[in-house]
Image (spheres, rainbow, N blue to C red):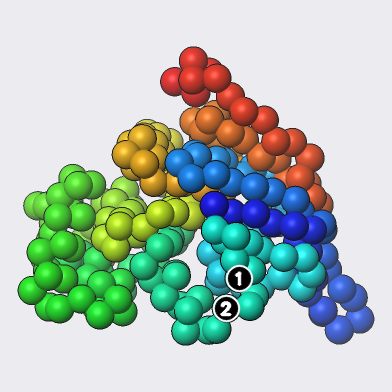
C-alpha cells in the first residue's frame, strides 16, 4: 500500500538546516496495524504527515499503491486525503462552532455527498464510536475522550483505506487512552490499515508491528506476536 524510498525531510532555518527525516525506507501493507515510536523530535509526526500527503519530502520517493505521490496533481492529492485517508490528531481538531454531527459531516461535504446522505452517514459513524447520544453537543460540552471519539468518527465517515493517528491519546487520561487504542484496534480488525504515532511504550505494545525512529531514521522494525499484543 505504502512504500517510502530514501525519504528525507529538511527544514531550512536560515543559518542552519534541520533534518527531520534521513533516508527512510519503509513499506506498509494493507490491513496492518503499525505503531511509529520514538522520543520527541525523532521525526514521527513528520513521517506521518508525509504519509498523509500533508507534507512533501525534500528527497526520496513516496509510492502509494505503486504511484509516485509527487507526480500527482494537487487536486488528486486532495481527493486521496478526503476519500481514502482518515486523520486523528492529539488536539482533536474539531470545529468549536459545529456540533458533533456537523463536525463529522465536514469530510462528506468535501467529498461532494448530498446533505441528507451526509447526516445519515455522520450519525452512523458516531453510533459506531458510541456517540449517538451526543449528536447535537458542541466540542466544549464534551470530555476529551468524547471529543476524540468524534474525531475518530470523522476519520471513519468516508470509509478510508488508511487511518493515520498522531498521538491520539496524548491529551487523555490513561484509562480513556486505552479505550481509544482499543477502538483503533477494532477498526483495524475490520480491515482498515492503521498507522499510529506515539512516544508511549505502553501504547506501542498495542500494535502488531512496531517501528522505532531516532534522529529521523528507522532504528527498529519488528513484528509482534498476537499473544504479546493482547
- Residue most toward the front? 66
Q: Quadrant of the C terminus?
A: top left
Give the structural element (helix, strand or loop) at label 2: loop
Residue at image location 66% in from the left, 63% down from the top? 62
- Please report the residue visible at 55 percent of the width from the left and 19 percent of the height from the top: 225
Residue positioned most to the right: 15
Residue 33 in picture, x, y percent from top left? 49, 39
Where on the picture, by quarter, is residue 109? bottom left
Question: Mark 2 = which residue?
Answer: 72
Dividing the picture into quadrants, the one containing residue 99 is: bottom left
- Classed neighbour count for the residue bearing mark 2: other residues with Cα under 10 Å, few (<14), some (14–19), many (≥20): few
Q: Is residue 173 visible?
A: no
Q: Specify the quadrant of the image occupied by residue 18.
A: bottom right
> Closest to the observer: 141 or 208?
208
Relative to 77, 93 lies left or right: left
The structure residue drawn at horizontal position 54% and vertical position 52%, both measured from the top left corner, is 1
Give the x, y percent position of residue 87: 43, 60
Callout 1: SS? helix
> With 94 as the anchor, is 39 left or right in this view?
right
Residue 102 or residue 175, whichever sits in front: 102
Tell me: 148 left or right of 100: right
The residue at the far top in this view is 227
Q: Position of residue 46 (x, y in %)?
A: 65, 62
Q: Residue at x 18, y 63 (%)?
A: 122
Q: Viewer-proximal residue, 83 or 68?
A: 68
Question: Would you say the residues marked 1 and 2 are in contact, meaning their CB atoms lie under 8 Å apart?
Answer: yes
**Which residue is identified by label 1?**
69
Q: Is residue 2 visible?
A: yes
Amino acid at each position: 500500500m505504502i512504500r517510502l524510498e530514501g525519504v528525507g525531510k529538511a527544514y531550512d532555518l536560515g543559518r542552519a538546516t534541520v533534518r527531520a527525516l534521513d533516508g527512510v525506507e519503509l513499506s506498509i501493507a494493507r490491513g496492518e496495524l503499525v505503531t511509529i515510536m520514538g522520543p520527541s523530535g525523532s521525526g514521527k509526526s513528520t513521517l506521518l504527515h508525509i504519509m498523509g500527503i500533508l507534507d512533501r519530502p525534500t528527497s526520496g520517493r513516496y509510492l502509494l499503491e505503486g504511484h509516485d505521490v509527487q507526480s500527482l496533481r494537487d487536486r488528486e492529492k486532495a481527493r486521496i486525503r478526503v476519500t481514502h485517508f482518515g486523520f486523528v490528531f492529539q488536539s482533536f481538531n474539531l470545529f468549536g462552532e459545529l456540533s458533533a454531527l456537523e463536525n463529522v459531516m465536514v469530510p462528506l461535504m468535501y467529498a461532494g455527498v448530498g446533505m441528507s446522505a451526509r447526516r445519515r452517514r455522520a450519525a452512523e459513524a458516531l453510533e459506531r464510536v458510541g456517540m449517538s447520544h451526543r449528536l447535537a453537543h458542541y466540542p466544549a460540552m464534551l470530555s476529551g475522550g468524547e471529543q476524540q471519539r468524534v474525531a475518530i468518527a470523522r476519520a471513519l465517515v468516508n470509509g478510508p483505506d488508511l487511518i493515520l493517528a498522531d498521538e491520539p491519546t496524548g491529551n487523555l487520561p490513561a484509562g480513556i487512552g486505552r479505550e481509544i487504542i482499543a477502538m483503533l484496534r477494532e477498526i483495524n480488525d475490520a480491515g482498515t490499515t492503521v498507522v499510529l504515532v506515539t512516544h508511549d511504550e505502553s501504547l506501542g505494545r498495542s500494535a502488531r508491528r512496531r517501528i522505532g525512529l531516532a534522529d529521523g531514521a528507522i532504528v527498529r522494525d519488528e513484528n509482534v506476536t498476537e499473544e504479546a499484543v493482547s
